[in-house]
Amino acid sequence: MEKSENYIQIIELIKNKASLKQEIYRNTLAAFNELKNCGHKLINDLIGEMNQFDKDVLIECSENGDFEFSLKIGGDIIMFHMHTNVFDFHPDHAMFKTTYVKEDRDRSYCGMINIYNFLADSAKYHRYEDTGYLIGRIFINSEKHYFVEGRRKLNFIHNDFINEVIDSKAIYDVIEHAIIYSMGFDLLTPPYKEVQEIRVGQLMNESSKMMLKTAKRMGYKFSFED
């Protein structure tokens, strides 16, 4: 039986797009595993430094499955989470104006690793109403080119998608800047009027389970950080 044009098109899509996305997934997973390795190494180095002058500051690296790990440093948790899907970008994105992507449209497809910042006490005391923030996203394509969207230096140091290839040095630098930003992003008291009322049931519960939401810069727009 002669194959239809649709069938032939499907085969081509599988050969090209499905194969392309698998390659991007493998590149992203390799980068994520290197993130974990660098995270463990950095934490071990920091523990050695801290043991010389303050052993009470909690510093650790923990893994939660194949696609998530976190660094706990004092009162902060910096969580790295790899999305298992591959993404394209909006047609208005700046990358589509570059010669690099114009020469090969497939270069715009990327895997994604998210970086979040949470308060360590939110997890410790099961304060599920507390809020964390996305502070950065790492995008990696089929050629291992990458760029980072994020806050402060995370946003403008690693943004040369055309030329930069992900490696251990770049990964280590991203982790360090994520830690610096998170630890410099302080917890502020909310405006008095926003917390002047409280339900009786909240006070009757143990303090670790109170439903008062806590977050850095609570009551302020996060865009003020830009």
Image (cartoon, rainbow, N blue to C red):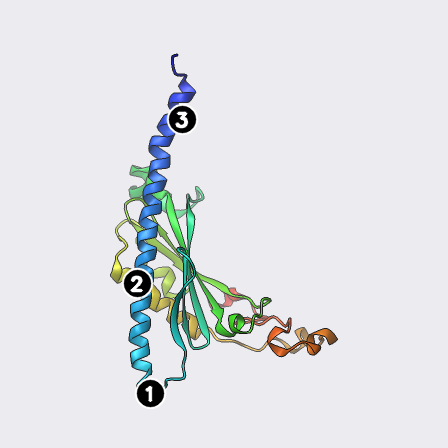
Residue 10, labelled with which disc?
Answer: 3
Q: Residues within 10 Å of mark 1 (few under 14, many from 20)?
A: few
Check the image and name the residue furthest to the bottom.
53
Question: Residue at coordinates 29% horizontally, 49% vertically from top-left?
Answer: 145
Q: Are marks 1 and 3 in contact (CB under 8 Å)?
A: no
Q: Nearer the viewer, mark 3 or mark 2?
A: 2
On residue 53, which mark appears?
1
Q: Could you tell me residue 132's position as x and y percent?
A: 51, 65
Q: Secondary structure at mark 1?
A: loop
Residue at 64% over, 71% down: 211
Farthest-out residue, top: 1
User: In terms of secondary structure, where does tag 2 sit?
Assistant: helix
Q: Amino acid at mark 1?
A: Phe
Which residue shows up at 34% across the image and 56% down it?
Answer: 32
3D distance between C-alphas at marks 1 and 2: 26 Å
Q: Residue 37: which numbered mark, if any?
A: 2
